[in-house]
Amino acid sequence: MAENVRVLLSEKEVDARISAIGEQISRDYAGKQVHLVCVLKGGSFFMCELAKRITVPVSIDFMSVSSYGGATKSSGVVKIVKDLDEPLKDKDVIVVEDIVDSGRTLSYLLELLQQRGPRSLALCTLLDKPDRRVIDVHVDYTGFEIPDKFVVGYGLDYNQRYRNLPYIGVVELN
Ligand code: IMP
Ligand code: MG
């Protein structure tokens, strides 16, 4: 089956929005250090761009959880594949995700990270598909709310491809 990727959010739009979120976070965390927790692999492109636009001191860490197989549907199973290197105790933590879909991954992850005693814990996602929510998750910073379409680019993949696209596109099978 042939695939086609249609642009949903251009590189310019995404970059401008990330700059705005970076400014917002810099204001909200004035006088503090933010500890960005990237959820691999999807959150990595967004986190790097975001980190560059935050003007308060930043530290970063990575973790990997699996909630999806090779397909485009949630399995509902969340597993820690790679844990963080650093403790979260007394840190002002912002979890950086590519997308909140059903909310299963994030609700599990936030609960787990909360138990590690951060001073504060916030969630920042590049994309949100509110129509797909199964479990309620509080999102502090959202790049864009998007319709219920399977998207790729800026870290998001379809069978591990397209993560490197500098824009957000919709995969069309034809
Ligand atoms: P949730 O647990 O259903 O909220 O799933 C979140 C994860 O599913 C994201 O971090 C992505 O890795 C993946 N995901 C959900 N929707 C999409 C999509 O449209 N494109 C690519 N990956 C997606
Ligand atoms: Mg992800």
Image (cartoon, helix red, strand yellow):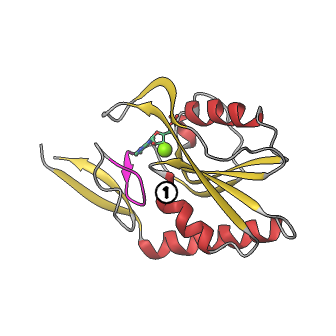
Q: Nearer the viewer, residue 153 or 60?
A: 60
Left or right, 74 with respect to 157, comes to: right
Q: Residue at x 29, y 50 (%)?
A: 171
Q: Residue at x 74, y 49 (%)?
A: 122
Q: Residues within 10 Å of mark 1 (few under 14, many from 20)?
A: many
Q: Position of residue 83 (x, y in %)?
A: 57, 38
Q: Nearer the viewer, residue 117 or 107?
A: 117
Q: Residue at x 81, y 71 (%)?
A: 27
Q: Position of residue 160 (x, y in %)?
A: 30, 46
Left or right, 162 with respect to 139, comes to: left
25 is higher (above) or lower (below) than 61? below
42 is higher (above) or lower (below) than 64? below
Q: Position of residue 162 (x, y in %)?
A: 30, 56
Q: Tell me the chief SS of the magenta region.
A: loop
Q: Quadrant of the N terminus?
A: top left
Q: Secondary structure at mark 1?
A: helix
Looking at numbered disc 1 in the image, what kind of residue is underneath it?
Ser
- Magenta-drawn segment: 149-157
Left or right, 157 with respect to 55, comes to: left
Q: Nearer the viewer, residue 31 or 10?
A: 31
The question of residue 152 being in magenta is answered with yes
Q: Position of residue 92 (x, y in %)?
A: 79, 53
Q: Residue furthest left?
A: 1
According to the picture, the residue beneath numbered tag 1 turns out to be: 44
Left or right, 26 with respect to 51, comes to: right
Q: Is mark 1 within 8 Å of ligand 2?
A: no
